[in-house]
Amino acid sequence: SKLIRLKDDVLLFRAEESFQLKKFDESLSFLDRMANESYRVYRLTGQIFFESGQPSDAASYFERAANTAPNRDAANICLFELAQSYFAARAFDATITALNRIKDPDDELARRLISFRADRYQQVGQYEYEPPKIVIRDIRLLDFSNDQIIDAGEDYSLEIAIANESDTP
């Protein structure tokens, strides 16, 4: 059993190396020779199919990876990859469902989700995307004629809409 585990570790390492070199068929060949399937095998197989332009095939592996993930953060990453696969396969409802399954994402994933969710919801017509706004309070104005700072008071606020790159001409 230790020998089988060692063999699987070597095969997985070689599969990951081939994947990094974009040798997808070779990578799948290493994975096919493994005795045990696991979270890492499912996730790597999903990544191979996604990168080789087969998002529908990738989705089933990301689903398996999410279901066998060792912890919540790993499951969330797989669900995000699942959503990306569904979107690439034009399965828009499934994209939204996968995104909604992500629970308590870490800060890095949360940042990635904000723009992905907004863009995807807008593309599937679930809501009108409104760019985030920054509201600045406690405004002070500079009077250039005598270099004095004038407190504008609480009656004034300034809203700045942040435009996407696609919003700019």
Image: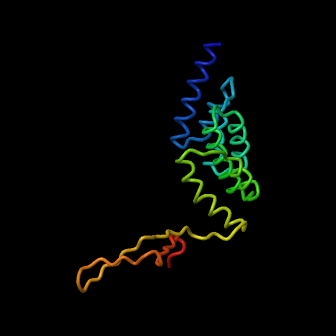
For image coordinates 56% across by 48% down, the residue present is 109
- Figure quadrant of residue 48: top right
Residue 102's x, y, as percent? 67, 47
Residue 93's x, y, as percent? 76, 58
Of the pair 76 and 63, the residue shown nearer to us:
76
Residue 118's x, y, as percent? 62, 62
For image coordinates 67% across by 67% down, the residue present is 122
How many tags in the picture?
Answer: 0
Residue 25's x, y, as percent? 62, 39
- Left or right of 111: which side holds 70? right
- Figure quadrant of residue 124: bottom right
**Which residue is the extreme one toward the left?**
146
**Which residue is the extreme one toward the bottom?**
145
Residue 115 against residue 166 in the figure, above or below: above
- Figure quadrant of residue 66: top right
Of the pair 69 and 145, the residue shown nearer to us:
145
Colouring mode (rainbow / by chain / secondary structure / one colour): rainbow
- Left or right of 92: which side holds 81? left
For image coordinates 26% across by 79% down, the residue present is 148
Q: Quadrant of the N terminus?
A: top right
Residue 35 against residue 18 in the figure, above or below: above
For image coordinates 72% across by 42% down, the residue present is 63
Of the pair 169 and 118, the residue shown nearer to us:
118
Of the pair 29 and 163, the residue shown nearer to us:
163
